[in-house]
Amino acid sequence: MENTINTLRLSGTVIGTPTVGHEAFGEKFYYLTLGVPRLSGAQDQLPVTLSERLLDGKLPAEGDALAIEGQVRSYNKIIEGAGRLLITAFAQRIVEPDERENPNQIQLTGTLCKAPAYRTTPFGREIADMMLAVNRAYGKSDYIPCITWGRSARFAAKLSVGDRIMLTGRLQSRAYQKQMPDGTVLEKTAYEVSVGHLELLAAEERPDAAQAAQAAAPFRAPQQTAAAPQ
């Protein structure tokens, strides 16, 4: 089977002050928020994980331009007693910003680990949610939520657990509301890949459904309702 692809390039402006997120083997990793513009003029506010090794001793400050290349990563964290899937843009390189390029680019190759959820909005917009398991080094996998629209959503609705797909798109932030048992409503933000192009790979490149289901066994994604992209 071909090597799994997980590539990301983001270019934008630092929002707020980076903070130390965690430390591994003596290496500090900083968390920051990167404001990345959309064509519509709106802005995605995306979580970025940045190693101190990339910084040359100088932290980026609020308002600084920053461009990175890396991967979309996921990890599970216990929040309020429940496991949550958290998404981050993991920087592997800091690069020079290029205003001629699309500031938000992702390419992924992976395996569907849940059946796509197809639906239509009250306004008739077709949407399909997918969960893609993307392998990386040392036997680990990232579980990346993806959303697609229109004709691509109809195509995605016909896919099955275990199908191996390749897609391109962008990482986006999306505000949504969660109603609590006591009736209060919390404002939340989800992070997902908005799919621009979706392709089913040849049958010989796909694991069987049992393998995909086994890989997804420890994973439980929060249920969220998507809003139309901007």
Image (spheres, rainbow, N blue to C red):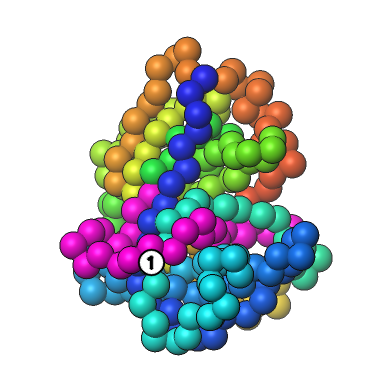
Q: Secondary structure at mark 1?
A: strand
**Principal SS element in the magenta part?**
strand
Percent x, y for residue 54? 54, 66
Q: Residue at x 18, y 62 (%)?
A: 100
Q: Residue at x 28, y 52 (%)?
A: 124
Percent x, y for residue 224? 54, 58
From where the camera sits, is residue 179 visible? no
Is 39 positioned to the left or the right of 191 in the image? left
Residues rendered magenta in the picture = 83-106
Q: Which of the 4 image quadrants contains residue 161?
A: top right
Name the image quarter holding the C terminus.
bottom left
Q: Residue at x 68, y 48 (%)?
A: 220
Residue 88 on the magenta segment:
yes
Residue 227 vertical placement versus 7 (above, below): below
Q: Residue at x 38, y 66 (%)?
A: 67
Percent x, y for residue 215? 68, 33
Number of residues whose C-alpha sits closer than 10 Å to that of mark 1, classed few (under 14), some (14–19) or many (20 or more): many
- Residue nearest the viewer, comparing 32 with 193: 32
Residue 40 on the magenta segment:
no
Percent x, y for residue 47? 52, 68
- Residue nearest the viewer, comparing 140 with 198: 140
Is 132 positioned to the left or the right of 97 in the image? right
From where the camera sits, is residue 168 visible? yes
- Residue nearest the viewer, comparing 105 with 156: 105
According to the image, label 1 marks what residue? 67
